[in-house]
Amino acid sequence: MYTQRPAEFDYHRPTSLDEAIGLLGRSDDARALAGGHSLLPLLKLRLAEVGTIIDIGRIPGLDGIEQDGDAIRIGALATHAAVAASELVRSRCRVLAVTAEGIGDRQVRNRGTIGGSLAHADPGADYPTVVMALGATITATGSSGEREIAADDLFTGIFTTSLQPGELLTSVEVPIVAAGNGAAYAKHRHPASGYAVAAVAANLKVESGKCAGARLVVGGVTGTPVHATEAENAMIGIAPVDEAAIAAAVEKIPSALAGALGDTYASPDYRVHLAQVMAKRAIASAFEAA
Ligand SMILES: Cc1cc2nc3c(=O)[nH]c(=O)nc-3n(C[C@H](O)[C@H](O)[C@H](O)COP(=O)(O)OP(=O)(O)OC[C@H]3O[C@@H](n4cnc5c(N)ncnc54)[C@H](O)[C@@H]3O)c2cc1C
């Protein structure tokens, strides 16, 4: 039966991180609620049921955006709109601000959070691809304290992460894009939602016109974002980074995309094709930004 009402659940609204973690640990089917822009649709459509909702949205101190050495630490509850509007992010890691600005629509950006997006691990989400390309580090907090997870190790499958039961994602530390480096993100937006049908984040290190390092991550095509390792290797050492060199590297993208997803909007082959188009755009923009 079609319904717009979730099944019943218990609801808690903790006012501190400790209280939230205590509540999460108390029941096997408790789930955090942040901006609600992924969880609530699932509950309302009864694609998911949870016994206990822990609404973390009003815990103070979890939405900060601040510089921490060579990185920017972004609290889990920072909304997409806050990331997009942050002068710090815009000036030191512009690709992330531009990515946030391109998520969904205004309402989604005003409610959805970076922590919720990373923890939800939707294959079509934007942040996972970008934080992997930037080499970000995620902090998870549970009853035994904090631990760090490299963004490359966070996404383990469709809607699945290496967060442990009872843990909350509390912040993400994104390296500042250093002088001489350039990062860019290109996505083919789903026309209805804005989710990535295929997207590529490129993070290049350029020295005297030569590509000295490359991180290329493809999102939206497979269950998790993946490094296009052969294309990354093909980029290293090329000079000049011109159209022909980019085209040669981009030819290697499909080798990373075994198991490409398909749906009524885009077949697996079309997604792989789009990934190559997005890769060309992302690499060219990243090189220009370097
Ligand atoms: C119409 C529409 C269009 C959208 N378009 C896009 C788009 O173009 N690109 C894009 O990337 N996203 C898009 N989204 C998704 C949006 O960005 C969500 O905000 C995001 O995926 C989830 O963040 P949230 O704060 O709303 O999380 P919630 O919905 O509250 O939670 C999502 C999941 O993450 C868990 N969770 C939340 N916070 C934490 C935490 N701190 N620690 C551990 N677990 C946590 C919850 O338990 C839940 O399982 C769209 C959503 C909608 C409704």
Image (spheres, grey):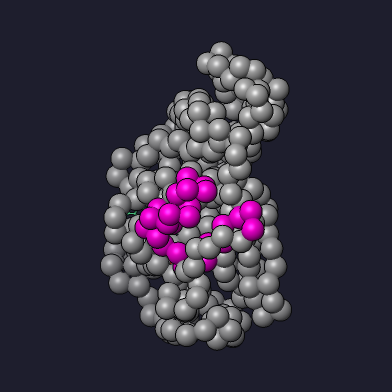
Q: Position of residue 154 (x, y in %)?
A: 63, 55
* Residue 186 sits in quarter: top left
Give the farthest residue toward the top.
244
- Closest to the observer, 203 or 36: 203
Q: Position of residue 84 (x, y in %)?
A: 40, 53
Q: Residue at x 54, y 38 (%)?
A: 183
| Side (left or right) of 237 relative to 85 | right
Query: What segment is highlighted magenta in the picture?
Result: 69-94
Q: Kindly identify the residue that appears in the image at 40 percent across and 35 percent down.
A: 188
Task: Give the image quadrant in which the ligand numbered 1 is located.
Answer: bottom left
Against 184, residue 255 (above or below) is above
Viewer-side residue, 260 vs 180: 180
The image position of residue 25, as x and y in percent, is 61, 82
**Direction from residue 238 to residue 131 in the image, left or right:** left
Residue 22 at least partly seen: yes
Magenta-colored stretch includes residue 86: yes
Q: Please state which of residues 188 and 123 is positioned toward the viewer in this rendering.
A: 188
- Res. 5 image quadrant: bottom left
Q: Is residue 95 magenta?
A: no
Whether residue 38 is visible here, answered yes or no, is no
**Residue at the location (40% across, 67% down)?**
35
Which part of the image, by quadrant, shows the N terminus?
A: bottom left
Determine the residue positioned at 64% across, 53% down.
Answer: 70
> Above or below — where is 63 with respect to 51?
above
Which one is in front, 81 or 90?
90
The quarter of the image holding the C terminus is top right
As drawn, 75 above or below 135? below
